Amino acid sequence: MQEIAGWGLDAAVAAGAAYADVRVAEERHRSITTKNGKLGTAADNDSRGVGIRVLLDGAWGFAASDDCTRASVEATARRAAMIARASALVRQKDVRLAPEPVHHAVWVAPCAIDPFSVSVDDNLELLFAVDAELRSVPGVTLAEAQMNFQWQHQLFLSSQGSRIEQTRVLSGAGFVALAFANGDIQKRSYPNSFGGQYQLKGYELIHELRLLENARRVGEEAVALHRAIQCPQWNGTLILDSSQLGLQIHESVGHPIELDRVLGTEANFAGMSFLTLDNLRKLRYGSNLVNVVADARIEHGPGLGTFAYDDEGVAAQRADIIRDGEFVNYISSRETAAEIGEPRSNGAMRAEGWNRLPLVRMTNISIVPGPTPLGLEDLIADTEDGVYLETNRSWSIDDKRFNFQFGTEIGWEIKRGKRTRMVKNPSYSGITTEFWNSMDAICSAEHWTLWGTPNCGKGQPQQTMGTGHGAAPARFRNVKIGTAYGGAKP
Amino acid sequence: MDARLDLAKAREWLRAAQSSAPAGASLEITAEENQAELTRFANNAIHQHVAESTLVLSVRAQFDQRTARASTHRLDATGILEVTDRAVRLTRSQAEDPELLPMAAPAGTSPTGVPSRYDEATAAITPTTRAEAVRAMVEVARERQLTAAGICATRQSRLGILNTHGVEAFHASTGAEFSVTMMAANSSGWAKGGGPAWHGLAPEAGARAAAEKACATADAIEVPAAPMTVILEPAAVLDLLGFLMWDFGALSVLDQRSFLSNRVGTKLFGDNVNIVDDVRHPLQTGAPFDGEGVPRQPVTLVENGWVRNLVYARQTAARAHAQPTGHGFPLPNEYGEGPVNLVFAGGATPVEAMIASTERGILVTRLWYIREVDPYQKILTGMTRDGTFLIENGRLSRGVRNFRFNQNMIALLNQIEALSPAVRASGEESMDMVVPALKVRDFNFTEVTRF
């Protein structure tokens, strides 16, 4: 890898680059799914290639290739330089980069059990056991289970002298039960939708998830939803489980704080942000209980956004984003940080792979748990009248991140401090800052989970990125509930 | 750049893979080359500009009623042997599937009249050519004191699917695309176009149309959310229709997760709804074969509102006692098949005439962040974006703040009052299709956002 990266860096500098960085990466990905007692997917993919980013004539060029011969790598570097020259034909100002120390590092993420050392036979044995347990529940019409493992090894070299080698192992697993009856499809997922839970861990994650132990309950809930009442439409008190709160953070905090969106560079596709620069350190984003951090360090936990250095060689950091309800920070790159006068990037440039340009992406964007011991059942006991919702089913938010609507798979009414009737098709909607300002309770650290969102899309060409979101169950007041089905029935 | 993949190379790889596979094993290889370049601009300047060249070989092994797949970018002799070995080992680990069919054999019936989708001139487009196109769009923005953002992209691709039963399917294609958002102080407009060839895309004309919308929707007013008559421009229709595509896959109906479960053969939509899947259509793109190399057949999905047919992969067709239609995804997979060349038949009413016939309604340029709220009622939610107009007394009166909708798609397809001629449309939430603009009554807007 060192040799390949060196060829690329030397050729980029020789082509006139004022700055260049090279990422050489190898990846391996195993994906196994089952469906109703049969194999769904069985895939074992590997990938290797080089991506070269060049700053020349004040503008960027990027080229990538999976042909790692010396001639091809050098041609790829020259192509990146040629592209940068073309970019300079339509520029407003020269790109400037915030300073970053030179780093020499080798980092290997903690991984107790190498998932690729576990046989596919063992993977399938567990998945088929989960599948059988789900389908043993009368009324379950479709059972799907899956496991995903990724090994990523990347060498980063920059013309400023950094040399950073990182290895990460990511694992994910989960299952879903669908029940179709009487013109209605209901589903339950475990431990989360989007395929389950994903973390920067090895096979130990699969053991921790206790998939088989939860299968029957989840299957029974999918069937029970057919007997549940429709979620009523009203303005009231809402309690979210930690996984749904994690997605709420992702959509209504994580995306708006991306500094490239704020500065307009995502305007054509992903959109912009209501968090214009005049809001920095002035906007009351949420109630005093709302504290959100962006934290890519391993100390935060094994999240999908955990690393030692980002993909432009900036060291992982923790940054307060919302402090006691006040908006205090964006997530940034070296270029965007320089553009707003910040002294340093806070290290959020991430690329989907060697063939993609790094973009400002969420790392682990997490809400800080409450300081005093409080569990979900305590929170429900403290609520006179409301609903408790679990596990995302639909999610949508406008292109400046004001108006959102979420649906969840299941919910329960809360009456006089007790969880009562199950509700189906629950949803809620609102305006981002009004919603976060209505939060009046959040559970404590022992109820906080670092969720993985594996499917965050952004950029052109689009890139899919895994992000982390730590969250605990929380309560919100005077929320619009049930709007998704209001007037929408045939 | 020179092509890295041709049929001869794919044959060589299949032979190499076969040499290391166990006796009696069937093999299928899928080789895919992609040379793609994209110029991205924002704030009236190019800020990202990328190129990638990739060539991936995927090997599927099948024996003893088992199958699995492995892929690699390492295409020397060692890499091909290694990926074949991984596919074989993974296959050996699978459970037997008594219903697994043998690999596809060469098909007798191929669709005729599929036009070439490879354009030499597009394959030769340079970064400078795209930058000049961006410069022209940015000039339009400057003339109108607007800020432009968008992309210009070109690509060339090659796809080969070959197996040891004699299938040899190969397709070369090019593609070109532009997208532009024009932003004023408190409004925006958008346009997008795409197709197999760069020539004829007209990004500057798109920029002018987007600029006009940005200026015309300035200082948008808030109109209370309620069911209203809407005119959905083709990009908005496309993005909604894209959420119905997978429901027409026969496996999703057998799995009872399609909204068409128990509804195939029924009159579900209005008389004016006619949808086919047809790879031959001159405005369509894509390979004329599916993930197993089976030729795609034209399929009538909806005729005068009746749900007539589904699409079938070989495996699903065997289960359902139907004929495969050439719409299968690469095996093994859990989703079966889907139509990927949708053509929604248009009508004769231009958008201008739709507006003129509307006393009060909303014109929608584009939709955003569409998600499924209910899988069987087929309720979708999402937002309007980048050019939402109030129509009053038969004309566009002014911009309005963007709406959230929660719309039952079955109801929508029963409430179409007029259709424009169908065009090739590009959106952001689904693949390109051939669709008309639609005038629809009682479109269910439920909330209004802040801009």
Image (tube, coloured by chain):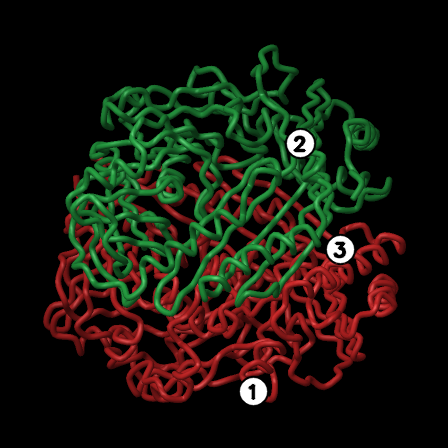
Residue located 47% across and 83% down the image: A329
Q: CA distance from mark 2 to mark 1?
A: 47 Å
From this view, report whether residue B158 is shown above or below residue A166. Answer: above
Chain in green colour? B
Which of the marked residues, 1 or 3, is nearer the chain's N terminus? 3
Residue kind at label 1, given as amino acid type: Gly
Q: Position of residue B30 (x, y in %)?
A: 68, 33
Q: Residue A313 shows which numbered tag?
A: none
Q: Position of residue A147 (x, y in %)?
A: 54, 51
Residue located 51% across and 19% down the image: B297
In front of the other: B420 or B312: B420
* The image quarter in which residue B240 lies: top left
Q: Are marks 2 and 1 in one subunit?
A: no
Q: Position of residue A286 (x, y in %)?
A: 31, 81
| Mark 1 or 3: the one toward you | 1
Residue kind at label 2, given as amino acid type: Tyr
Res A313 visible: yes
Q: CA distance from mark 2 to mark 3?
A: 27 Å
Residue kind at label 3, given as amino acid type: Gly
For chain A, what colour was chosen?
red
Residue that label 1 marks? A341
Residue that label 3 marks? A49
